[in-house]
Each structure stands twice: as C-alpha cells, then as structure tokens.
C-alpha cells in the first residue's frame, strides 16, 4: 500500500513543477476519497481504504470540499487509511485543517459521547484547544471500524470551519464499495475476517 502514497507524491512533484512557471493556483492531482454514488462506489481510493481495514462496515469519504480548502494527501496502508484536506490559501499551503483516519478501533478516552449525525454510528468529541486555534478530535465508531476526524482550525472563522467539516465528511457502506467492485471487475473485496 505504500506504493499508493509514493505514486501520489511523484505525481504531486511533477504537478507542483507547474508552480515554477508562474501558476499560483493550488494543483489538484486527482487522487481523491470522494464519496460518489452511495449505492455503487466507483472510486478506487475508497476500494483501497476498504481493503486496508477489512473489518470496517463503513468507509469515510469526501462529500464536498469547503471553499477555503482543497483535496490533500491520501495515505493507505494495512490497517489504516487516511485522507487530508489542505488549506486552499497560497500563503498556507502546508496547513492541514482536517485529517480523517480510518482504523479498526479508536481510543475515545477523554472524549464525550454526543448525538451522532451519521446513521449507523456513535459519535464522540474531544476538544483539546479553542484559542488561538480549534484543535480536537471527533470519532465515529461503527461495526468493525472507527473514523477519527482530527481538527486543526485557525483563523477568525474556525467555528464556521467546524460546521463546514461536518458537511464535508460522509460515509459509504462497504456493501456499496463491493457493488462498485463487482460491477467493474466481477471480483470481490477481500472477505472480512
């Protein structure tokens, strides 16, 4: 799975070379964890994520990208899959306002359970800092998996960014990922252990 990240970085370096020619727009290299069709997921990144955590009945994905953010890195390896949102600002291109990590389990100690906004999940919140930045974790726990949202929001609009993040991240079912794989290849995802 490390090859996925290496390939993404190679493409990123090539794409970033366009910045040397005077282009100041952030370059989007096309490796995305976008949700797509909720019934038949046709996104290879989400297939890799489902394979990385084969116990998970759900896979986190990107519903939309807030206006001040852009797609960030995707990192998939055995037992863990993650994607980031990056700052859309040319001045803060290294900023990662939100990371989403899928694993089999999460440590929710020190977090408070709150009503969930995602069907089929339980949700916990752990706030670590409010000033000068909003730093905290949100956990969605479901059968066979956990998605941790790691917030590092700065600026005067950080409360708005928390709301945008809630709309930005969604989930697709493992069943939908399997349906997409079957439609394209007649293959199956690795069986759940």
Image (cartoon, rainbow, N blue to C red):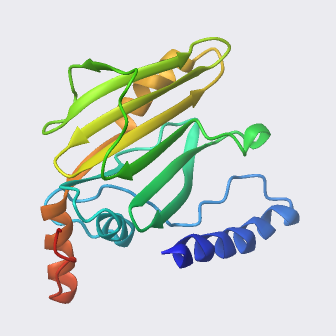
* Nearer the observer, 37 or 136: 136
Residue 126 lies in quadrant? top left
* Nearer the observer, 3 or 18: 3
Vertical order, 40 against 159 (above or below):
below
Q: Percent position (x, y) of residue 63?
A: 34, 46
Figure disc tally: 0
Vertical order, 181 against 103 (above or below):
below
- Report the residue that reaches farthest toward the top: 131
Q: Residue at x 65, y 74 (%)?
A: 11
Q: Residue at x 26, y 50 (%)?
A: 145
Q: Residue at x 18, y 61 (%)?
A: 174
**Residue 91 relative to residue 151: left or right:** right
Q: Percent position (x, y) of residue 132?
A: 68, 14
**Residue 93 relative to residue 77: left or right:** right
**Residue 12 relative to residue 186: left or right:** right
Q: Percent position (x, y) of residue 34?
A: 37, 56
* Nearer the observer, 5 or 112: 112
Q: Percent position (x, y) of residue 25?
A: 71, 52
Residue 111 lies in quadrant? top left
Q: Which image quarter holds the C terminus?
A: bottom left
Q: Residue at x 75, y 39 (%)?
A: 92
Vertical order, 102 against 39 (above or below):
above
Residue 47 lies in quadrant? bottom left
- Report the residue that reaches farthest toward the bottom: 186
């Amino acid at each position: 799975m490390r090859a996925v990240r290496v390939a993404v970085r190679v493409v990123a370096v090539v794409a970033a070379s366009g910045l040397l020619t005077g282009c100041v727009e952030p370059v989007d290299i096309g490796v995305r964890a976008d949700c797509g069709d909720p019934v038949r997921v046709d996104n290879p990144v989400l297939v890799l994520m489902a394979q990385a955590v084969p116990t998970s009945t759900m896979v986190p994905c990107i519903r939309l990208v807030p206006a001040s953010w852009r797609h960030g890195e995707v990192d998939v390896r055995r037992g863990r899959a993650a994607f980031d949102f990056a700052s859309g600002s040319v001045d803060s291109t290294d900023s990662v306002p939100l990371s989403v990590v899928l694993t089999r389990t999460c440590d929710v100690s020190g977090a408070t359970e709150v009503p969930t906004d995602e069907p089929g999940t339980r949700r916990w919140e752990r706030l670590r800092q409010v000033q000068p930045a909003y730093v905290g974790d949100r956990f969605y726990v479901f059968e066979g998996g956990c998605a941790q949202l790691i917030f590092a929001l700065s600026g005067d609009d950080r409360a708005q960014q928390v709301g945008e993040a809630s709309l930005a991240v969604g989930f697709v079912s493992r069943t939908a990922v399997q349906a997409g794989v079957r439609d394209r290849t007649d293959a199956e995802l690795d069986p759940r252990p």
